[in-house]
Amino acid sequence: MDFLRIQNHIETTLANRLPHYLDLLRQMVEINSFTANGQGVDRLGKLTAEIFEQRGFRSEFIPSERAGFGHHLFLYRDASSGESAVQRPALALISHLDTVYSPEEQEKHQFYWRLEGRRAYGPGCVDIKGGTVMILMVLDALREAFPQDFENAQWIVALNASEEVLSADFSGFCLQRFPQHTRACLVFEAGNIQDKTFKLVVARKGRAYFHVDVEGRSAHSGNNHGGGANAIVQLAHTTLRLASMTDYGRHLTVNVGVVRGGTVVNRVPHFAHAEVEMRAFSPTVFAEAIQQILSLQKEPQVYSQDGFACKVNVRLVEQSSPWPENESTQQLFSVWHEVAERLGMKLEGEKRGGLSDGNYFWEHFPTLDGLGPAGNNAHCSERDPASGKEQEYVSLPSFVPKALLNTLAIHKILKEGPS
């Protein structure tokens, strides 16, 4: 077949099957898979495994290292050719099972599956259950249009049970299971469309998470105010210094997100606590900012009258390194860009401030993100037209063209590699 005939064949096939795929998405969305709802995550994992098993994939469930969370899901389909494993192209397709919505939140805001015009609303419909359905569409299209190339490839579909809370164990399991010759890690997080231009993610910020604890000295606020060292006031100094580190020119942000301290109003507070996150694209800026934040514990500003100094302790709780722009990601993006031009589509690379599993893979394998359908309002369950609040939705017209683009680009990788 020539390119135009292949394009028309894939588009027609996917369009005819779209009601089937949307029904699968409905089934997924109707299962509450809040990260802390381990049973719900496992129900979704079981449904997902059954759907893929119908397409020749075998499943492996791996318990999360965090108690109460669900099982990570790995789906495998081995190559059918007689070539050695290293000669067979291997691709890893990444999604996740969990969402940010608890059952109570869904009930409070009446946030359930519904179709309205060109949109489908529901928990996780775009982040990322729509991405999982996109993987199905692409695999089905490859098998239909390029059966021999599909059969000769080694496929791994990996679904994180706790991506929304950045559990690091999933990436370790992936690195144990992905072949060293994996040609690409393709992440099916939502892919934005702006001014009829598809956006693919080529870089993401890293994130560092800190606890700041201040130890002061308590005292009676009336009788002995000067004998106390106010931990809340010290924390105020520290948080102002943290906030001042934000530098938009360097794409560095420091956000003080949680603050608490003290016990009663007639007592000089002896403790205060804050939780802080820092994000940056550049690995150098990221590393420098971590050290700058940790250095704040060296210089207290609040003392009692007799010289007792508040003690500031800054602890780095966890970090996820940046995924900067890099050559291997750019090579993958170039494949999608070339195919998009042949299809008459506009395509641009996008750097995002949020993290995905791609942050963990780019140093090991060529990685590209944003391959899922388009949508908006991820992580939002509220609906109030008067105030402009709208619930998470996925764009129905984005499925077929995005699946077509992904299918033809992945086929090119199977035949030629990412470069």
Image (cartoon, rainbow, N blue to C red):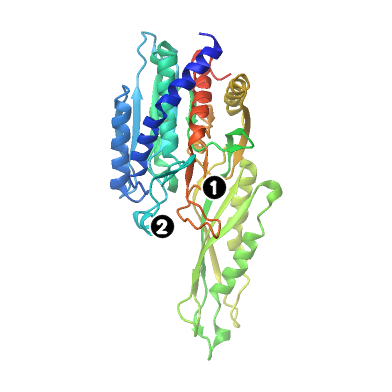
| Residue 160 picture quarter | top left
The secondary structure type at the circle numbered 1 is strand
Residue 399 visible from this viewpoint: yes
Answer with left or right where residue 19 lies relative to residue 6.
left
Q: CA distance from mark 1 to mark 2?
A: 30 Å
The three-letter amino acid code for the residue at tag 1 is: Arg
- The quarter in which the C terminus is drawn is top right
Residue beneath disc 2: 109
| Disc nearer the start of the sequence (1/2) | 2
Q: Picture coordinates of residue 310 (x, y %)? A: 56, 72
Residue pictured at 34% horizontal, 54% vertical: 103
Nearer-the-camera pick, 213 or 194: 194
Residue beneath disc 1: 207
Tag count: 2
Residue pictured at 63% horizontal, 60% vertical: 243
Answer with left or right where residue 331 lies relative to residue 66.
right
Q: Picture coordinates of residue 42 (x, y %)? A: 29, 42
Please name which of the two marks, 1 or 2, marks the residue nearer to the observer: 2
Answer with left or right where residue 161 lies relative to residue 211.
left
The three-letter amino acid code for the residue at tag 2 is: His
Residue pictured at 63% horizontal, 54% vertical: 292
Q: Is residue 321 above or below residue 177?
A: below
Q: Picture coordinates of residue 236 (x, y %)? A: 59, 69
Residue lying farthest front?
117
How many neighbours does mark 2 have within 10 angstroms: few (below 14), some (14-19), or many (20 or more)?
few
Residue lying farthest right?
249
Answer with left or right where residue 243 lies relative to residue 31.
right
